[in-house]
Amino acid sequence: MIFTSNFKIAGHLPQAMAISLGVPKGWRGTRCTVLAPPRHLIKIMDPKTFIPLYRAQVLDRLEPHKIIRDLGGDNFVMVCWEDPGVFCHRRVVAVWLEKATDIKVEELNPKLKRHQEWLRKMSTVQA
């Protein structure tokens, strides 16, 4: 499964993949900066302005299947800074991946049973 989340919720997971330019101090996890919005787009909070610019300047230059292969298959969590429910580029990436690959990309919710099961499965794979 592929998920999105933020550093606070999922940054500690071995499957966490930072897709932002900045990361928390001491971050030792994996990064995928090709999915990070350029600095000049980061401050654009209006989705109607941000999404087409981000797609044109970042996503349209990438191949979704290659991104998934480069990130290790379909068991990772793309993380950045924003809280769940707040507009964020990670959900734009999620929609882009879903449309191109038919792989569902959900926001990780550790309270959901199916997400708990995935986390348990991933912890045994890492052991």
Image: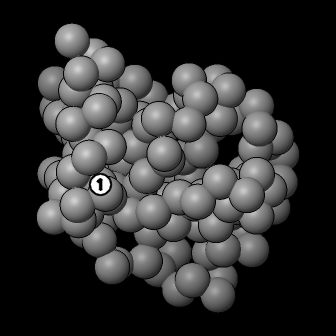
Q: Is residue 5 left or right of residue 105?
A: left
How many numbered tags mark residues here?
1
Q: Is residue 46 left or right of residue 83?
A: right
Q: Residue at x 38, y 63 (%)?
A: 107
Q: Amino acid at mark 1?
A: His
Q: Residue at x 21, y 51 (%)?
A: 116
**Quadrant position of residue 54:** bottom right
Q: Does dot 1 land on a helix, a strand or a loop?
A: helix
Q: Residue at x 33, y 79 (%)?
A: 85
Which residue occupies the foreground of this view, 109 or 86?
109
Q: Residue 67, percent across and down?
A: 68, 35
Inspect this view and state whether residue 72 appears. yes
Q: Residue 66, percent across and down?
A: 76, 31
> How is this picture coloured?
one colour
Q: Residue at x 57, y 83 (%)?
A: 47
Report which residue position mark 1 lands on: 115
Which residue occupies the foreground of this view, 1 or 81?
1
Residue 107 higher or lower than 80, as above or below: below
Residue 35 higher or lower than 66, as above or below: below
Inspect this view and state whether residue 42 appears. no
Pointer 1: residues within 10 angstroms few (<14), some, or many (20+)?
some
